[in-house]
């Protein structure tokens, strides 16, 4: 169980790292948003999964998954708002 | 070298770096964003110091709400920028120590003030006894007489009641002074500067029930765990601002009397508690009878949450809103 959770954590960290590299390296704002939201959502998903695997009770696991879903909704909406603002600006 | 120490060192380095960049930032927008990230790092630091109550408050007020207010102020500066042209605007938004605006004397004054405050703080820290927990033991000994189970709530709403009372007074004063500055009597007719769109409306509509749930949960949590009126109030404020921003009914649609009532509810409730305890024959002022203290604290917390939410959202709406002509 611990090995599984450790691996998932590392995978999550890898996606976060990829997202951050994208944020720093990509040329324009739209692709930066793309890198950040997509990769970080996946990274957060893996870390939540790692915590779910080690969590003691079902309620904790359920709460963790709820947190992830909420973060997904928030980040994709914010991504949409930012991107639309950028496109309208031209 | 263990991992937590490494993390702490990184955290302190990040705090120092962000504050340095913040002070040296050349434009106000960058400085605002850095200030928000400084608040987030600071709340992480509070968590490392095992003060989750302060961490929650710092993240919500220091990073969230102060960020919104600063961004609102920044937006308020923007239109003038356009009118004055590019060159002037970058000058006006510059926080440059060499520019004539602050002046050498001002800088010297600021440095003297900050320096002496730092020296005083250092002296105060050095003056603390190296061992011992201060008043912690006393708080835990009297906890079962306070009416709540969480020591922080017990201190805030029972042992050091008047501190919290005055804090709420400060909030009311802040709301009144911003009303004076904006030359208004209430929030009615204030609209967001842009027409809200469908996507935002739907998102906020979906999030509102969750936020109400979080407000009630945080309020209830204050009895026995980190949480309580301030945290719940800030979430309530965020909800009211979002509702307003997305074009739903929010505090701007309240009647003036109702709005004023919720503005002062917390302060008034505490004043009432103070008057009742002061006029009760066998009680000292602000001393709650043991069997009543739980109920009194709950009533005050509910009123305080309402007031904090309304005051903070009013501040944001007053600084962000525009009157439609």
Image (cartoon, coloured by chain):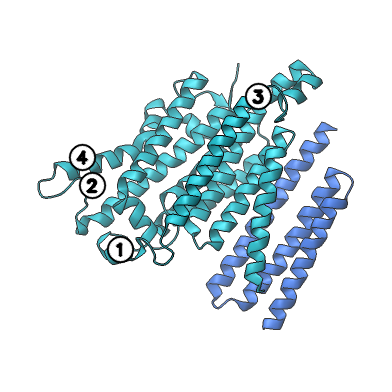
> Local crowd at mark 1 within 10 Å, few (<14), some, or many (≥20)?
few
Tell me which chain the residue with mark 2 is part of: B
Q: Along the polypeptide, which appears first: circle 4 or circle 2?
A: 4
Give whichever of B235, B20 is nearer the camera. B20
Q: Residue at x 52, y 21 (%)?
A: B182
Q: Along the polypeptide, which appears first: circle 1 or circle 2?
A: 1
Q: Work out which quarter of the rendered image holds the C terminus of chain B and state it.
A: top right
Give the residue at mark 3.
B103
Q: Along the polypeptide, which appears first: circle 3 or circle 4?
A: 3
Left or right, B33 with reference to B227? right
> Local crowd at mark 4 within 10 Å, few (<14), some, or many (≥20)?
few
Please tell me the numbered disc located at residue B138: 1
CA–CA distance between discs 1 and 3? 50 Å
Figure check: B256 above or below A50: above
CA–CA distance between discs 4 and 1? 27 Å
Figure check: B44 above or below B315: below
Please tell me the numbered disc located at residue B159: none
In the picture, one chain is cyan; tell me its letter. B
CA–CA distance between discs 1 and 2? 18 Å
Q: Residue at x 27, y 54 (%)?
A: B295
Please tell me the numbered disc located at residue B286: 2
Q: Nearer the viewer, mark 4 or mark 2?
A: 2
Give the residue at mark 4.
B275
Tell me which chain the residue with mark 4 is part of: B
Q: Position of residue B57 (x, y in %)?
A: 50, 50
Chain A drawn colour: blue
Tell me which chain the residue with mark 1 is part of: B
Find residue B63 and report its image quarter: top right
CA–CA distance between discs 4 and 2? 8 Å
């Amino acid at each position: 169980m611990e090995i599984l959770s450790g691996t998932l954590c590392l995978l999550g960290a890898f996606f976060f790292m990829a997202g951050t590299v994208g944020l720093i390296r990509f040329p324009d704002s739209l692709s930066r948003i793309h890198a950040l939201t997509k990769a970080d959502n996946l990274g957060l998903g893996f870390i939540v999964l790692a915590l779910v695997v080690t969590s003691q009770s079902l309620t904790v696991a359920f709460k963790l998954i709820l947190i992830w879903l909420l973060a997904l909704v928030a980040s994709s909406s914010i991504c949409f708002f930012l991107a639309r603002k950028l496109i309208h600006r031209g | 070298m263990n991992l937590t120490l490494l993390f702490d060192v990184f955290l302190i380095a990040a705090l120092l770096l962000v504050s340095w960049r913040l002070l040296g930032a050349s434009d106000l927008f960058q400085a605002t964003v850095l200030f928000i990230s400084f608040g987030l790092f600071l709340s992480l630091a509070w968590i490392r110091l095992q003060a989750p109550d302060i961490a929650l408050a710092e993240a919500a007020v220091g990073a969230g709400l102060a960020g919104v207010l600063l961004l609102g102020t920044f937006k308020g500066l923007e239109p003038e920028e356009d009118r004055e042209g590019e060159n002037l605007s970058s000058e006006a938004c510059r926080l440059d120590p060499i520019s004539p605006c602050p002046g050498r004397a001002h800088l010297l004054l600021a440095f003297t003030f900050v320096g002496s405050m730092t020296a005083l703080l250092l002296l105060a820290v050095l003056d603390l006894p190296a061992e011992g927990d201060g008043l912690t033991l006393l708080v835990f000994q009297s906890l079962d007489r306070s009416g709540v189970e969480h020591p922080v709530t017990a201190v805030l709403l029972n042992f050091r009641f008047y501190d919290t009372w005055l804090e709420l007074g400060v909030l009311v004063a802040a709301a009144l002074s911003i009303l004076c500055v904006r030359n208004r009597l209430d929030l009615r007719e204030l609209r967001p500067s842009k027409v809200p769109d469908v996507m935002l409306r739907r998102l906020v509509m979906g999030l509102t029930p969750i936020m109400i749930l979080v407000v009630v949960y945080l309020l209830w949590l204050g009895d026995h765990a980190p949480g309580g009126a301030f945290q719940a109030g800030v979430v309530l404020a965020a909800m009211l601002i979002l509702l307003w921003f997305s074009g739903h009914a929010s505090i701007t649609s309240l009647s003036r009397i109702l709005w004023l009532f919720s503005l002062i509810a917390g302060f008034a409730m505490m004043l009432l508690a103070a008057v009742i305890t002061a006029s009760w024959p066998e009680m000292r002022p602000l001393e709650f009878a043991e069997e009543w203290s739980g109920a009194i604290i709950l009533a005050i917390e509910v009123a305080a949450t309402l007031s904090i939410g309304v005051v903070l959202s009013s501040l944001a709406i007053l600084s962000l809103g525009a009157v439609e002509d």
